[in-house]
Amino acid sequence: MAEVAYVNASRVFPGTPPVRAVDNLELSVADGEFLVLVGPSGSGKSTALRMLAGLEDVDEGAITIGGKDVTNTPPKGRDIAMVFQSYALYPHMTVAENMGFALKLRGVPKAEIREKVAEAARMLDLTRYLDRKPKALSGGQRQRVAMGRAIVREPSVFLMDEPLSNLDAKLRVETRANIAALQQRLGTTTIYVTHDQVEAMTMGHRVAVLKDGILQQCASPRELYDRPANAFVASFIGSPAMNLKTVPLTPEGARLDGLVVPLSRSALDGAAAEGLSEVTFGIRPESLRLAAADEAGMTMTVELVEELGADAYVYGSVRIGEQSERFIVRVDGRTPPALGQQVEVTVRDADEVHLFHPGT
Ligand code: ADP
């Protein structure tokens, strides 16, 4: 068990200009925590994880594991176990041999290895497969062997780099729940990299969102959803994405076609103090609804309806000033509007409106 910390850690790849793949990362992961690093491709997630593993240099700052500075410690001395996207299983070894290999290298007695492998296999439902070679396993089973190999080492920290990306959608959902439950049971500090925000939100105790090597926000899934620090986080978390529009501010609030969304006094005062005449206005599809007949709304022309059973997502355009703007609205799946229809849309609750600085 161990706490992990990035202390203003950077990784700068040489080039013209140099790439700050991880830029001044300041982040602590508590003992026993499941922390997810999430961000689009190229945002520095893998580099950050590899720095923790000792597979990538730390050019500036430091990394500590269990309070000990490991910035210059080779991977072997870090007491971590990594699960790779590719699983990296040895094809000529059986499942049991794959799982026990690290212990064998350490010189652990055979009987103890057998016991630890058997216990991990029980946890992962792999007991029946211990004598098989990896090629005789399904993708999901191979993934579990990769997990098992990490578990038997009883490391202080698990590092996982997109461990579910080779599984089909259904298995991915099952496996993410299993990994989260297993982590809970073992209580081992875990850093988990994914580009999938749903995976991040469902698995992480906290989620750290990266963009261009820079940490945007690190918070609980709830906090990220309710209070995104900037428009990037707002658009990255939630599916379909938050509607984000640059809108003019009026003394009453934000004007969207026929709809004036009242904004809190503090939001308006804050914007006025900064001399902002427009803001980036954000509202999630689930925070919009179709207006009742006697309610004011913005007029949306329906262009696409995505039916998901209980809900439907309606994509349409709204005229805002000279522009035609795309909005997504969640509606009751039993009564979706028709393509081409004009509907009036309003905000469920003005408290669910997010305002951001233009350009964040
Ligand atoms: P992610 O895991 O979020 O997709 P990476 O950590 O792989 O992102 O990459 C972050 C940035 O660093 C990218 O711009 C990538 O091109 C760059 N990068 C990664 N590895 C190297 C390398 N070995 N040499 C040069 N640039 C690299």
Image: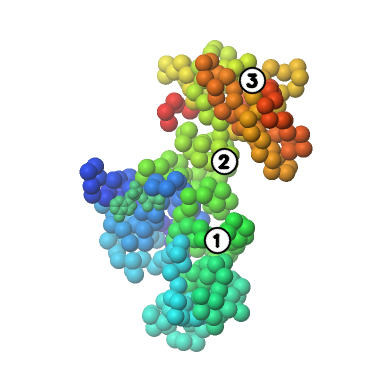
Tell me if I can see residue 133 in this picture. Answer: yes
Indicate whether 157 appears above or below 7.
below
* Left or right, 331 with reference to 94: right
> What amino acid type is highlighted by mark number 1?
Leu
In this view, the mark in front (3 or 2): 3
Indicate whether 94 appears above or below 287.
below
Residue marked by disc 1:
167
- Residue 67: where, in percent of width, then height? 37, 59
Spatial CA distance of label 2 from label 1 is 22 Å
Indicate whether 239 appears above or below 54.
above
> What amino acid type is highlighted by mark number 2?
Gly
- Residue 57: where, in percent of width, then height? 28, 57
Between discs 3 and 2, the one toward the N terminus: 2
Residue marked by disc 3:
298
Spatial CA distance of label 3 from label 2 is 23 Å
Spatial CA distance of label 1 from label 3 is 42 Å
Identified at 36% across, 54% down, the residue is 47
* Left or right, 26 with reference to 123: left
Classify mark 2: residues with Cα within 10 Å, few (<14), some (14-19) or many (20+): some
In this view, the mark in front (2 or 1): 1
